[in-house]
Image (cartoon, grey):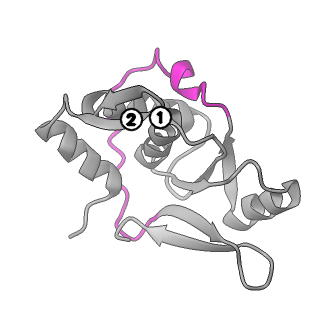
């Protein structure tokens, strides 16, 4: 059976904890660092209502913080919805409502904010059929069209 993305990352942590997992703008994280920080963000988000059956929008710029937060959302059991913050407000509002977003993460400082929390895994294992993310296309009707993708792809 297909494994959820977060479980694949955890397996890679076990194999190569000190290998570089993500690199951006001269900054990098190893798999162990990525996993630990994502666990901390997952705890913070869970405390704010993220969890199974919930959708969390990410309006962060492309960065290591985006990757850590996306993985943290998945580790909380919630699905993520990437949203380009430069889109017109009306389009963003439509996407947030259409996806049923319950929490919006718009501050890359969330990783630093979560840094004092325990970095162990939360133990949330989503069912393969649960939503992992919602991605929006431009839509042929002029309205964005959301496509939900489960943990099995």
Q: Which residue is mark 1?
A: 64
Q: CA distance from mark 1 to mark 2?
A: 7 Å
**SS majority, magenta:** loop
Left or right relative to 88: residue 50: left
35 over 112 or under it: above or below: below
Left or right relative to 151: residue 59: right
Instruction: Return the x and y of residue 106 as percentages of the image width and height.
Output: 68, 38
Q: Residue furthest front?
A: 26
Q: Residue at x 39, y 33 (%)?
A: 39
Q: Which residue is mark 2?
A: 23
Q: Nearer the viewer, residue 24 or 81?
A: 24
Identify the image quadrant of the C terminus: bottom left
Bin the neighbour count of mark 2 within 10 Å (Cα to Cα): few under 14, some 14-19, many 20 and up: few
Magenta-colored span: 107-131
Q: Nearer the viewer, residue 21 or 10?
A: 21
Instruction: Return the x and y of residue 109 as percentages of the image width and height.
Output: 60, 24
Q: Nearer the viewer, residue 95 or 43?
A: 95
4 over 142 or under it: above or below: above
Q: Residue at x 68, y 55 (%)?
A: 101
Identify the image quadrant of the N terminus: bottom left
Instruction: Return the x and y of residue 32 as percentages of the image width and height.
Output: 26, 30
Q: Is residue 13 magenta?
A: no
Element marked by disc 1: helix
Left or right relative to 119: residue 112: right
- Mark 1 and mark 2 residues within 8 Å of each other at the beta carbon: yes
């Amino acid at each position: 059976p297909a494994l959820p993305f977060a479980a694949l990352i955890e397996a890679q942590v076990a194999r190569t904890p000190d290998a570089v997992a993500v690199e951006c703008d001269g900054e990098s994280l190893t798999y162990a660092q990525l996993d630990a920080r994502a666990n901390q963000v997952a705890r913070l988000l869970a405390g704010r209502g993220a969890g199974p059956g919930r959708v969390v929008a990410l309006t962060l710029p492309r960065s290591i913080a985006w990757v850590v937060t996306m993985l943290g959302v998945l580790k909380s059991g919630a699905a993520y919805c990437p949203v380009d913050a430069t889109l017109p407000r009306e389009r963003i509002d439509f996407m947030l409502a259409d996806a049923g977003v319950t929490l919006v993460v718009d501050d890359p400082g969330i990783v630093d904010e979560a840094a004092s929390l325990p970095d162990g895994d939360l133990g949330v294992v989503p069912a393969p059929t649960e939503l992992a993310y919602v991605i929006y296309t431009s839509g042929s009707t002029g309205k964005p069209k959301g496509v939900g993708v489960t943990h099995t792809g």
